[in-house]
Every structure is written in structure tokens, then in C-alpha cells.
Image: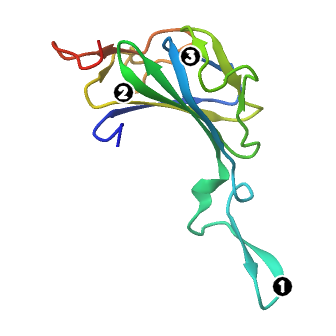
Amino acid sequence: DAFAGGTITHTFLDVGDYHRYHFPLSGVVKEVRVISATNTAGGYVTWDTKSKRYVFNPGGVGWQTIETRGCIILETDRYGLVALMPIGMSPVSSINFSADIKQGTQVRKGREMGSFMFGGSDFVMVFQKKVNFTLDSPNEAGSDLFKRLLMGERYGKLVLPETPKYR
């Protein structure tokens, strides 16, 4: 319930992009979790009792479980709890947290959090309800698409209400 009604940001890394991720804020790590992929890339695999074989269903429900997800809950002084979720997409589907990132670790903005193996990847941040995220990334000229950004470039800002709950 800590994130109910909160704001989600989602960024995509293409195959050739920088595949390390860094803490976007300073704070204390409250939780570190890796949720492994459960199926093969591109579909859903089930056990067929008749043939006594695994059966591949490329369009079945459950395809979304092929991505390995990570989750770090970061407690910040200013913005409360923030969920940081690297998502390793298929076909490699991997996330690798830095070995020294553990529950209770004090981290500073910019510190490396981990890396993806080869492939496309996503990074999701979830903020609590009292924190608003304003997307201010520039658009490509003459397009509705956002400009491709490099690591460390700003794409938005966090805004607190006048009487923030988290100070």
C-alpha cells in the first residue's frame, strides 16, 4: 500500500545503450529483491501430461513473466520510499545488482546500482502518492517522440506539495 496512488516512470534502453544503472536519489536501501524469469523467451512453456513433454505456446497468457525483474526499495529523506525496478528483457533477461548493495546500505545519488547483460532493458521508478513526477524531457524536432537521452541527463523532476509529508 505504500505506493498506492503514486507515480510511475518507465524508461527503455535499446540494445546498444549503456547498460549499467545508477541510483537516481540518495537514501537507505530498505529491500533488495530479484524476481527471476519463469519461462523461456518469447512464449509460455507448460507441461503437457499426455505427451509428457514441455509444450511451447508463443501467444499464451504468461508471456510477461519472461523478463527478470529487480526491485530496490530506497528510503529517502525528502521523497519517502521510492521503488527502483530494473527489468531485463528477453532473450537474455538478466539484472545484476552490485554485490555491495544490501539492505541497510546508505547510497548516494549517482552510485552504480547494477547492470544488465546484452539486450533491451527497462527501468521503472515508483514514487509515493505525495510525490509528483513532471516529465520535462525534450521532444525530437517535429515529433511526439521524446529525444534519446544519455545516462545522467535529466528527463524529469520531482515535485513535493507545499507541506510535504516526508521532510
Badge 2 is on which residue? 144
**Is 4 situated above or below 18?**
below
Instruction: Give the residue at the far bottom of this rendering.
Output: 50
Q: Which quadrant holds residue 65? A: bottom right
Q: Amino acid at mark 3?
A: Phe
Foreground of the two, 105 or 98: 105
Q: Is residue 3 visible?
A: yes
Instruction: Give the residue at the far right of this rendering.
Output: 52
Chain-order first, disc 1 or disc 2: 1
**Is 30 situated above or below 93?**
above
> Is 52 placed left or right of 73 in the picture?
right
Question: Which of label 1 and label 2 is nearer to you?
Answer: 1
Q: Residue at x 76, y 42 (%)?
A: 92
Q: Residue at x 59, y 69 (%)?
A: 60
**Is 66 situated above or below 87?**
below
Q: Which mark is residue 52?
A: 1
> Is 162 placed left or right of 39 in the picture?
left
The number of numbered badges drawn on the structure is 3
Q: Residue at x 76, y 23 (%)?
A: 99
